[in-house]
Amino acid sequence: MSAWQLPFTRPASLAGRHFSTVIVGAGINGVGVFRDLSLQRVDCLIVDKGDFGAGASSAPSRMIHGGLRYLENGSFSLVAEATRERNLLLRNAPHLVKPLKTVVPLASLFGGMLGSALRFLGRPASPRTRGLLAVALGLRLYDLLGRRQRVMPGHRIDRVPPRDRQLFRAAIRWTATFFDAWISHPEWLILELIADACRDQPRSTAVNHCRVMGCAGNILTLRDEITGELVRVTADTVVNASGAWLDRSTAVLGGSGPRVMGTKGSHLVLDHPALRDALDGRMAYFEAMDGRVCIVYPFLDRVLVGSTDIPVEDPDQIATEPEEVDYLLEVLREVFPNLAFDPADVVYTYVGVRPLARSDADKPGQISRDHSVAVDPPNATRDIPIVCLVGGKWTTFRALAEEATDAVLRHLGRARTASTDMLPIGGGAEFPADAAATERLLERLMATGASRRRAQALFARYGAKALPLAQRLAASGDLPLRHAPDYSVAELGYLCLETGVIHLSDLVVRRTLLAIRGQVTDAALAEIAGIAAEALGWDAQRQREELHACATALRERHGVRLQTAAPAADSPLDASLMASKPVLT
């Protein structure tokens, strides 16, 4: 198998096959289990009713963090685990996970001490901004709990430096500074984990847009969401890693429940150069006047703002509402009064549902972000156990996957043979150790014919795997897109053919960073649709349908300003499409 061939397949090829484990849900937690079990040489099938990582896993704050605010709830073990996992991801996926300097603006000395103590004791407390002493105590504990595998400096507290006096409101007297981390492209890390899994266990396979319809005996019925075809496979165990959909999937599989609840988190991506420059590479971590924790930090060439925390019943029926956009912009005006913020600054919105363990907590922020593994034993209709992943957060996926993998191994009567804790992921393997090694890799990338800017872009996306990809793209002619030159025609063709792309949205929203960076225009979308159609063999009707569906999703789910177009040959987008049709070489 080539380092760049991902063994994705369609349900029809699975008919009659047997797998030691079938994993339902290809978000970060399910894929983490897929990678860990495959490392133990267990043959696995992972399926998802949508695209890989299309649920909450593609909609985080893109922070890899220990959860500073969880300390108030007494979640010391969770913070210790999360900070260690953060440190491991900085080592194992350095191409995608980077340190994030974080600043906390402080206006008072004693503020929040009583409230923090009451919350720690599980008592209700009215919102009040935390002051220097409460934050200093929390950060000291945060550094202590995060000392294992640590690669970043500890915290410090200073008087507001001159450069920040015009950034924050006048009442701010001190700033606390500490380090967490951020991830540039979480959806790509999910695909890299799948690739690593299939390298370690070639009998493992991954299928997207494939729904589990039921389980009887040891037989699972699957439905291809594209063709409607039903196929059956057999398994020795099932892992339910469907996140906010856990209870629904469990019911289909004949298990117990309910176990989870969901809260949605909406985020904004702004085109705001003044704020981005003022942040100077740092994240601002602060509390709004209502006590809700918010974040804002430079994300690539944009600014990412988040997030809301609103209980929801149906994870399939969510969107970023106009009131949420207004709320987050108002919070920005409150914290950065010398800057102007307007809805026109928002180039992209996204929302996901956090899969939280069911709780009686009064406020969403009080619900634990911890995780657990529950097992539904065989019953009268099902002969195999279901291992359920309950709760969890992006940062701790490896630890949760390890716990779930151990549970599966016990049921299979097998022993763990390897650990994932220090195992590099995808392009993090053989990653340059220092600036000199990075420069040597960039020179090798430029030797393929890439400009320095193009070499840097490929390295940022694919890490150490950039070189074989650049060589492949050069052989095909690495011509930039006319309307989105950060990517090339050959690169998008590769993504279509070898990363399981089924719909245009899979390519635009998750395989690339074009959408989240606000770089998708009508012309760019039409050009990309033409590339996908040629690579995937779509006819003209399928191309129009995909273009219409993707444009609708970008407008309605992500706030992208595109023309409204019906899926007809004379639509505005179709005219752009005909003018932008590429030629794949």
Image (cartoon, grey):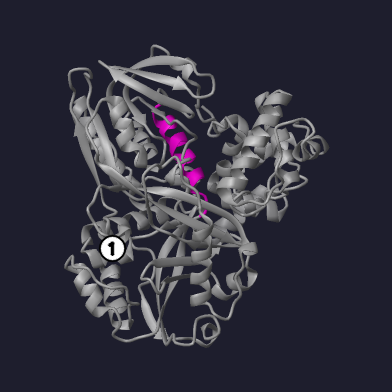
Secondary structure state at the residue bearing disc 1: helix
Give the extent of the magenta segment.
184-201
Where's residue 91, x and y in %? 41, 54
Indicate the quadrant where residue 105 lies.
bottom left
Indicate the quadrant where residue 578 lies.
top right
Does residue 324 appear to the left or right of 380 in the view shown?
right
Residue 187 lies in the magenta stretch: yes
Where's residue 497, x and y in %? 61, 29
Does residue 195 appear to the left or right of 517 in the view shown?
left
Q: Can residue 472 be seen at all in this image of the molecule?
A: no
Q: Is residue 280 above or below residue 556?
A: below
Number of numbered markers: 1
Where's residue 522, x and y in %? 73, 45
Q: Which residue is mark 1?
A: 70
Say which of 112 and 199 sits in front: 112
Q: Main secondary structure of the magenta part?
A: helix
Q: Is residue 189 above or below residue 166?
A: above
Quarter of the image where the C terminus is located: top right
